[in-house]
Image (cartoon, helix red, strand yellow):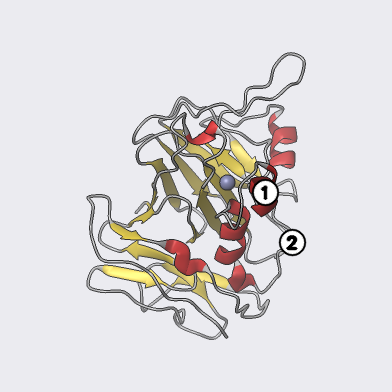
Amino acid sequence: MRRSKTVENGHRDGLGVRVATGSLLDSSPVGSTRLTLEACSRFAIPCLVPPGERHCSHSEGGPGTRRCGQYGAAVTTALQTTTITAGHGGAFPLPQGRQLRVTTVEGSQVVDTWALVPADPGEWLSMEHTRGMLSKVSPHAGDLLYSNRRRPVLALLEDTSPGVHDTLIAACDQARYDQLGHVGAHRNCVENFRAAVSFLGGAVPAVPSPLNLFMRVPVAADGRLELAPSVAGRGDSVTLEALVDVVVVVSACPQDLVPINGAALTPTDIAVELLP
Ligand SMILES: [Zn+2]
């Protein structure tokens, strides 16, 4: 078993504990046992608790901090806010009825967002099903978001951004950066996703199309697409509510070769809050 625990935790920046979730690289699947979301008695946060156990077996952090090493993300129990470093990702168990807020801290940062249903490894938030159910290409506040079983799994409760999000574009991957001319390894959202869900033991057969929060992809009348700079401003956020138990996976897209994350081509941090 290889498990990297190189979390660079430590300093607070007003939003919570900053972590470099490069620690997500974890090639040790733990099997495909069905897990249930319960309140972990050790960390007092929603977590995936194996059958028969009282708490998850993940690593802990310092005072005021609970770091769920299984997801490579820190949860500050006091503030319940995690800052994810630009280009990195994390996963957040979200029990039915709980809400999670995703913020672009500096603005203009695209957040690839997935939701998996831990009770059924074959069910996940599906952009193609959501588009069909909503009869539109982009969801707005008040919309339900659907799984590949055509049942609503998330609600888009609140949106303080201009409301421009994308459901059409696949998550970036190494091949994308290769094709753009980048030489060598490049961080990408697919690897962030795979790392974050490695605890599912390969139960996710493919990488679903993400809900690309704050990503602007105008669709022209003739059907052409444009990868345009995000219009999300500093501190803009989207709040999601779980309609069933889900694990939400996010990736602060590391794209720095096309201007989706702003004309400056500079990915920035995101914040994830588990609302009380
Ligand atoms: Zn990306």
Is label 2 in a helix, a strand or a loop?
Answer: loop
Image x and y of residue 50, in percent: 55, 80
Instruction: Find residue 122 and name its label.
Output: 2
Camera-side mark, 2 or 1: 1
Residue 209 appears in the picture as rendered: no
Furthest-top residue in this view: 221
Instruction: Find residue 254 and name its label.
Output: none
Image x and y of residue 49, in percent: 51, 76
Above or below, 130 relative to 26: above
Q: Residue at (75%, 51%) from the top-left corner?
A: 149
Residue 61 appears in the picture as rendered: yes
How crowded pointer 1 is (Cα within 10 Å; few <14, some 14-19, many 20+) is rated as: few
Residue flagged by tag 2: what amino acid is it? Gly
Residue 116 is left or right of residue 74, and the answer is right
Q: Nearer the viewer, residue 182 or 238?
A: 182
Pointer 1 residue Cβ closer than 8 Å to ligand 1 = no
Rounded to the nearest whole Å, what is the CA distance between mark 2 and mark 1?
A: 30 Å
How crowded pointer 2 is (Cα within 10 Å; few <14, some 14-19, many 20+) is rated as: some
Image x and y of residue 227, in percent: 61, 29
Q: Residue at (46%, 31%) from the top-left corner?
A: 262
Q: Residue at (40%, 42%) from the top-left corner?
A: 103
Image x and y of residue 204, in percent: 70, 64
Residue 248 is left or right of residue 133, and the answer is left
Q: Nearer the viewer, residue 117 or 225?
A: 225
Q: Nearer the viewer, residue 171 or 57?
A: 171
Q: Residue at (50%, 85%) from the top-left corner?
A: 53
**Image quarter of the N terminus:** bottom right
Residue designated by label 1:
178
Q: Earlier in the sequence, mark 2 or mark 1?
A: 2
**Image quarter of the C terminus:** bottom left
